[in-house]
Structure formats: structure tokens, C-alpha cells
Image (cartoon, grey):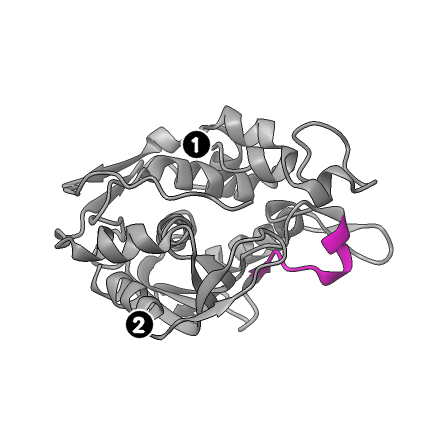
Amino acid sequence: MKQYLDLCQRIVDEGVWVENKRTGTKCLTVINADLEYDVANNKFPLITTRKSFYKAAIAELLGYLRGYDSAAQFRDIGCMTWNANANENKAWLENPHRRGEDDMGRVYGVQGRSWQRPDGSHLDQLKKVIDNLSKGIDDRGEIVTFYNPGEFELGCLRPCMHTHTFSLLGDTLYLTSYQRSCDVPLGLNFNQIQCFVLLALVAQITGHKPGKAYHKIANAHIYENQLELMRDVQLKREPFASPELKINPNIKSLEDIETWVTKDDFEVVGYQCHDAIKYPFSV
């Protein structure tokens, strides 16, 4: 919580106003933020200075790992975050590549599970990484990236958290995740949860101990219509201790994640928090 609150305060104190053409809402912005999550000691980075709903973030991660390309698929597993981007984004609604209601296009998990080669064949980046790590192999390229500039026009949104690098030292697995853009009041807690769970889950199914997850953000911002709530409400609250996350120990393979795992296979223990804050969302 301290590193989260320090970042929020830094944006309030040092941020520069930047116009955002896509949303039409100004952002108070800083460049470069580095966060760490202690997965080894199960200090789950769930925000405590407001009520946070972690299961939707985990459901979204599961959708990415399965390569989903429809907001309907995400809704079915308990995540509503793609409804607006799929169906209310003016540029995407006018895009000739959009295939109708709920279509997200070739974004996030589609790239991670089905990267299109020039010859038309597809590369499953995630499976390659899981297979290598399961054999104890780290070729210093155990990377899953959703960032494909050649197909930006084929999706409703460029990926925000776009690349995940896994590193194996002995029997301990580490994760470094890179994010180009971060809505700190609203989106960052989703992203924190997903970094933590991604490392914990991949370590579990590949037979390793989790170490730390490192989260690097290029552009961290607070939207103009969020600033008052952050400055005058959330930053005035005292944080509570971090809770713990329990993951169903029966999850043992990528196939399990693809077929039967749900958000209910994850449980938070010892979560104490302040009241919810309803931050506005910019599409």
C-alpha cells in the first residue's frame, strides 16, 4: 500500500497536465513508476484505502490467458470491463475490421495465444513459456507480449499492460511486467492483482516457488475528473495490512486454466478496507 499511495501522492504533487485525445479528458501525469509485489510471502496487493473487487481482475486475467476476443466471453466468466471498449468506443465502432457486437478484435490474449506470423500460421507464446518453465528452462526470452504494432487497427484498444517476462533463478520464478499507460485510481489495482496472480499461478503450474513480481509503468496518470476524489478522500485514509491470496491447489496445468478454472478458485483472506470510492471511467 505504501508504494501505491506514494505514487498517487507523487502524481498529485509533481504531475503535469496532458491532454488525452482518445478520451477527451485531461490527465495529471508522471513518467516512470516501479512497483514490487512480494508473492513469495503472499502479501496480496489489494487496495485497502477503498473497497476493491479482486475477482473481476482475476477473471479478466483468465480471459487473457485463454485468448478471448469477445466482451461476451469475459462477461460469462465474471468480468465486465470490456463492454465499453468493445461497444462504446467510437473509433472501434467505425472500424471496418469490427465483427459486430462485443467483438474486441486482436487484442491482449489473442496476441498472447495466437500471434500471427507472416506466413499465416500462429504462435502460442504462452504455451512456449509454460512448456519451457515446466522443464526448468529459462532462455532469457520467456516473454509473452500482447503488443503488436502491425495489428493495432485490428483491435478496439492498444494493450496497456503489454509484456510479461518470466525469469527463473534456481527453483524460484520471478516476473517483470511492463505497462505503457496506467489509470492509477481505477485501473492500477486491477493491474497489481494481475501481476501478482500471474506469477503465483504460473509458478504453481510449472512447479516452482514464486519470488517477486516487478511492475514497470511508463505513463502513470490521474484523470481530471478523478483528482478530487483521490486528493481529498482516498489519500486522507490510513491503509490496512495486506491480505493473503489462496489459489486452488488443484490447478496444475495450462489446460486446467483453459478449461475449468474460474474466479472462485481464488480467495482473499484477511481483507480489511475503507468504503468504496466510485471513480469515473474514461473510454
Who is closer to the viewer here, 232 or 161?
232
Badge 2 vs badge 1, beta-carbon distance below 8 Å: no
Spatial distance from mark 2 to mark 1, Cα to Cα? 42 Å
Tell me which amino acid carries mark 2: Asp
Question: Which label belongs to residue 261?
Answer: 1
Magenta region, residue range: 144-153
Q: Residue at x 25, y 38 (%)?
A: 276
Task: Pinpoint residue 11: horizontal percent, then vertical percent.
Answer: 35, 68
Is residue 42 visible to us here?
no
Report x, y in % for residue 12. Answer: 32, 67
Which of disc 1 and disc 2 is earlier in sequence?
Answer: 2
Left or right for 49, reference 114: left
Q: Name the residue under label 2.
A: 13
Residue 123 percent across, percent down from the top left: 71, 53
Counting the numbered discs, the total is 2
Q: Is residue 97 above or below residue 73?
A: below
Residue lying at 69% horizontally and 59% vertically, measured from the top left = 148
Query: In the structure shown, which secondary structural element does the residue marked by tag 2 occupy?
Result: helix
User: In the image, is residue 88 above or below residue 49?
Assistant: above
Which element is circle 1 on?
loop
Is 154 covered by the magenta stretch? no
Q: Crowdedness of circle 1 by 10 Å Cα count: few (<14), some, many (20+)?
A: some
Q: Residue furthest right?
A: 119
Q: Nearer the viewer, residue 90 or 78?
A: 90
Q: Residue at x 40, y 36 (%)?
A: 56
150 drawn magenta: yes
Question: What's the residue type where badge 1 is placed?
Answer: Val
